[in-house]
Every structure is written in structure tokens, then in C-alpha cells.
Image (cartoon, helix red, strand yellow):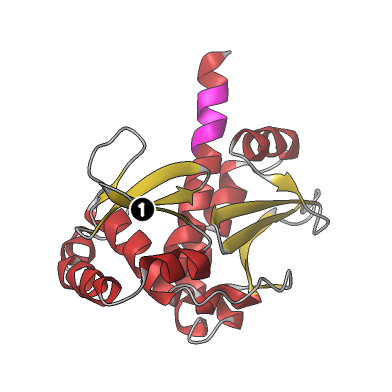
Amino acid sequence: MKPNQKWIESLEPAINEAREKLRQRDPARVAEDAGVVWIPGDPSRFEILFFGQPHFVSWPGLIVRKPDGQISSNLDQAFLLQYLVLADGTPPTESWVSLGGLPNGSFYEQAYQGYSGNLLARAFRGRPIDLKRAVEQAGGEPLALGDLAFRYLALPRIPLALVYWSGGDEFPDSAQVLFDKSASHFHHVEMLAHLGSLLCQKVIAAAKTEVSAQ
């Protein structure tokens, strides 16, 4: 599901607020808490791995750029800058919960499941082998959950778990994207929901890429 365009446009104040907050902090400490690379010098910048792809944040301008050097979208600007603001260095628990298991997550959970796990389960209904190939291509590492599960590092301190259950002949397949219990120390719940949705989109896109390459 594509994010609401009006919501994306409304993120501008949040982006500016995040920049102001970051300029008041020690960038080296920000990098340590967020698990990102701080490169001092002229120019100075942060390097953030976002689903394995390096994104760069200039200092003190705090402009986010994609791996190709292009300025990132408003959504990614807000997402990565707020991550730097909120990250507090809390270690991961490796204990997985649904979005509803996070503070304030129950308000979003039903809608979130509809545009994340349910979307993925429909896309790969009865095709667990194709799903396995797609999640591996998208960078997932095997995880011992459900009938099929993979761990992703969306951001350095925000791991995700994609879990799939086969319904067999009697029930529909199901899937969920789960979060480490520490996730609320690193981002707002609505942005975490966006992360889970983005992961599902990446897996579905990986499957389409593989089919077109055959």
C-alpha cells in the first residue's frame, strides 16, 4: 500500500523539528546510540544502513541522500532523521512482538496487518518455496519461527521478523511482520508500521524481479 500523499506532505514540520533537535546534540553520541557511522571532516556526515543500503545524512545541514546521491523523499527524510533523534542505544531483546505489543500499537494493528502480513500471504498463497526465494533475495536471514521465518535488519537498531504459516488445504495462509520489543526506543509506532509494510513490498517486488528474469 502506498503511503497517503497528504500525510507525506505534512511531514515537513517533523523533518525541520528533527533537524533542530539533532543540531543541539553531539553527533558522535547520536551515532553511537543509533548504531550508525559518524564520519567527521569537511564535509561531515552520518552513514545509515537502511535495509542494507547506505544512506547519507549531511552535517550540519542534515539532508538525507540515497546511495546514488539523490536527495531522499520526504518520507525517508522524516524516517531517518527521526530515527537519529529517538534512538537511545537500548540493546535488542530478540523477543518478538506484534505491532499491538508495542506502546500505542493496538490502535494501528488491524489496519497494519491488512497492508503488511495479509498482503504478503495473499501474494504467495500456496507458494512457500517462491516466498522463501523472495525473502532470501531481499536479504533475510533464517529464523526459527512459524513454518517459515526470516530476520531483517531494517535499520541498525530495528530488526524485523517476517513469519509465515501455511494453512494447508483447510485454512488460508497467514503472515506477520513482528518487531523486537525494543523497537519503541527507536521510532514512533506509525513509522514502525510503515517499516513492516515496506518489508512486505520489498519481498513481493523481489519475487516479481525473479519471475521477469526467468
Image-based side of 77 in relation to 33, left or right: left
Q: Position of residue 49 (x, y in %)?
A: 48, 48
Q: Is 120 in front, or is 70?
A: 70
Q: Is 169 in front, or is 130?
A: 130
State whether residue 197 is above or below residue 189: above
Answer few, some or many: residues within 10 Å of disc 1's Cα (few below 14, many 20 plus, some between 14 and 19).
Answer: few
Magenta highlight: main SS: helix
x 25%, y 71%: residue: 23
What amino acid does circle 1 point to? Pro
- Magenta residues, start to end: 205-210
Q: Give the residue at mark 1.
A: 40
Q: Is 162 in front, or is 1?
A: 162
x 16%, y 62%: residue: 9
Q: Name the quadrant containing residue 187.
A: bottom left
Q: Position of residue 179 (x, y in %)?
A: 61, 68
Image quarter hosting the C terminus: top right
Circle 1 sits in a helix, a strand or a loop, which is it? loop
